[in-house]
Structures are given as C-alpha cells and as structure tokens.
Image (cartoon, rainbow, N blue to C red):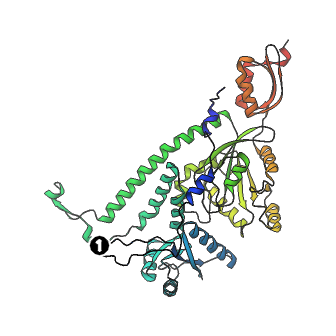
Amino acid sequence: MHKNTALDEFETTGFDTGEFDLEERQALRRVAGLSTELQDVSEVEYRQLRLERVVLVGVWTSGTAEDADNSLLELKLLAETAGSQVLDGLIQRRQKPDPATYIGSGKALELRDIVESTGADTVICDGELTPGQLRQLEDTVKVKVIDRTALILDIFAQHAKSREGKAQVELAQLQYLLPRLRGWGGNLSRQVGGRAAGGVGIGGRGPGETKIELDRRRIRERMAKLRRQIGGMSTARDTKRQARQQREVPAVAIAGYTNAGKSSLLNRVTGAGVLVEDALFATLDPTVRRARTPEGRLFTIADTVGFVRHLPHQLVEAFRSTLEEVADADLILHVVDGSHPDPEGQLAAVREVLADLDGVSGIPEIVVVNKADAADQEVLDRITRRERRSIVVSARTGKGIPELMELIERELPRLDHEVHLLVPYERGDLVSRAHKEGEVLSVDHVEDGTVLHARVLPSLFQELERVGKPVERVS
C-alpha cells in the first residue's frame, strides 16, 4: 500500500550517492608544471591552465604563537581546497593590522621580494582587508591580492550545487564586491543636459551617472532580485518544516566546524549517502533525513553548512534561511574534530556564529567528539571533562554510535501522555502514527478494534482521546 503522508514529503525518493558527486568533483584536476603558455599574444588570446601559486600572509595580534600558526595552517587548507599551490607562509607580529597596507609599508616591500623570488602570482591575507588596504597592497607587491573572505566565498562558489545554494553564494559575493568596486576615471561618466537629457534643461548639465555608479546600481538591483528568489525558494523548506512541526516529530540538527565529519555522521546514522570529502566546505546544501532511536521513536536529523573561524558575515546573512534548521531543532549535535590541533577553538568559533541566530540559545546541545580513531586520548579526555554533555564517536568506524543514539533518545522531548484506549479499526492510521511518532507499550487486537497502550505527544493524544474508548469501558 502506498503511503502519502505529510511526513514523507521531506524525504527524497531514491538513494543519494555522494560518491558520484565526489567522483564528478574530482573528474578534472589541474596539474602543476604542465602548462603550455602562448608567447605570441598578438594573434591568439593568452590562456593558461595551472594551479595558482600563492603566498600566505598573516598578522598576529593576540593569542599565542601556536594560535597564529593554526590560523595560518587553516588558511593553507582553505587555499588548497580552492585549488592553489601554497609556496610560502608569513606571519607578522603587530598590535593591530596596518590601516594602509595591512602589514606595513616596509613589510609589504619585503613581501614583494618574496613574491618575485618564488614566482607567486597571488597573495592571500589571513583577515578581511578594507578596499584601501587591498588596493595599496596590490600596488606594492604587483600581483593579485585577496583576503580570507574572498577565498571562502570562492570555495562556496565552487561547491554550491542547488539553485538556492548558488543564489545564496552569489548574494554573499555581491555584498562583498559592492564596496570594493574600482572606478577608472571620469572619462566613463555620461554627460547629460538639455534636450539630450530628456528635457532636464538648465542646471541638469554635467557629469551623469559614472560607470562605477552604474555598476553599483546594477549590483544592488541584482542583490534585491536574489533576496526575492531566496525568499521564494525557502517556501518549500518552510512548508516541509511546518508539516514536521504539526506532526510534532522531534528535530535534531548537526552543526559544527567544517571538515569535522558532519556528513559522515549523518551517513552513519541514517545511510543518507551524502557526499563526503576530506576538504573544507565539501557540502553546503542542508540535508534532512529521518531516523529512529533504539526504542523505535522517529525523529528527523539535518546536516547544515560548516563553520570556520571568522566566517564572513555576508555568508551568515545569505545562509540565514539554511541555518534556520538549527534554530528550529529540539536538539543540536555539535560535532568537533577530536584530531584537530585546536578542538576548543573549533567549539568556540561555532558557538560564536550560533549565538547570532535567534532562538538557538535555549536548545539542548550534545558535543560529539568525532574522529576518535585518529585522535589523542588525552585530548579526548580533556574535551569530555570540559563539556558536560559530550560523547566520543568515530563516524568512520562506527565506534560510539549506539551510545550516541541512546543519548539522543534521552535528550529528545519527552512523551508525557500515556494512553490505554480501544481504537476502532477504521482509525488504524492513529495506531500507525503511534508506532511512528510515539512509544508503543502493547497492542492487542480484539473484535471491536485495537487496544493500544502507548506514550505519545500531545497532538496525537488529543486525537486518540476523541475517537478511542477507555479500556475500562470495553466489555
């Protein structure tokens, strides 16, 4: 018999195979040192296909030297994820970044010498540069300069797959680009006035809308259109979420640092088949699946976009509709990489982002320390001592997953209403819901119907009370 319930709407048909997505993503890879660069650019357009060769630059303003090294190491991983070859990494100790060139004019000249000696074509700064810093540093080092925000936006643009994900990333990129547009002189302004200006007349002559102003206006118009599109595309997810809430199916959200193993955990718990890759921001689109506790209670579990230190505020704003899955959850599984050099820093970075979301502060949280098979036992013990509600698992080997499921069952909203009723056979759908959404203690089929003894949620309790008969009155 075909089932067509509101709860099934949010489930995708078929089996998602992340392996195919990973194979497609890796189907074409750049290979360093195999470029064929055209020298005669007068006849043919100059093209080249090779890895960008980058130098990393960071400013160490606070914390320990180990913190600064970890931050630059993460920037290296981000650069490699974006498709770059890292040649060198530099850290400068300063009280605060230089307002003109980020690292200071003298250090900028030293950086230019390093860029020339290594043959780098890009400099990546471990921070968000102002438009002025970006321009002056580029003028000094004579190669392309990008900051951490632009790098993360580039990775998101590569990995976005769904229409909503692509629109969210484009909106974030335009928000970043808008204050960084560069003008190219007054000769691109349009002169208006008199009849040529549509009757503006005297006082209307002079420079009209310049090219940069025109670009800004077009970007603002495109951003407004994207916001409307994202609002329309989120309607379907809101409808599915409302259906789950009406049926009062408990919701669990997986949140955590990028590459901590969130998708692997989702696959282990539900068999979802979501793409898994040892790379930062491998998956961006939220995935919702349903699972059951050891006692058979149904709940939904959602994978969300990963976080990172200094996550660009443009992305937080653009992905706000996606992050609502966390705000609407009954329980948050906060996944942290136990093998990372600074797992406490990962926890703090994720909580900093979650604190900016409305409605998240009061949701129970379980810290899931993943990658136990590769982590140091001392680090695992340190985290579990510090985090009151925590558990150590390995999504790769399955270690700790049964204990995690039992912990989820204890932390989900309680089934406070117990029923012992005779339900008519024509309302077998209510008995089926009790099996799916509640905890059935016993079932006995008699002549007039089904004697149901179960613990259920309030909405189902009310329906059962309306159609069922107390067992004491059954003759």
Q: Is residue 98 above or below residue 431?
A: below
Of the pair 196 and 377, the residue shown nearer to us? 377
Task: Please state if 277 lies on the left or on the right of 190 as rendered.
Answer: right
Viewer-proximal residue among 271 and 61: 271
Does 339 appear above or below 91? above
Tell me if I can see residue 362 in this picture.
no
- Kindly identify which residue carries mark 1: 185
Displayed quadrant of residue 377: bottom right
Q: Quadrant of residue 177?
A: bottom left
Q: Residue furthest top?
A: 475
Residue 325 in sight here: yes
Q: Where 312 sits versus 132, above or below?
A: above
Give the position of the C terminus as an image quadrant: top right
Q: Is residue 331 above or below residue 11?
A: below
Kind of residue indicated by mark 1: Gly
Residue drawn at the location 80% of the way across and 41% of the way down: 294
At which x and y percent is residue 266?
A: 69, 50
Question: Which structural element holds mark 1?
Answer: loop
Q: Residues within 10 Å of mark 1 (few under 14, many from 20)?
A: few
Expressed as whole percent of the image width and height from the top left, the position of residue 347 reads 70, 62
| Residue 354 on image: x %, y % | 64, 56
The residue lying at 41 percent from left, 51 percent from top is 224
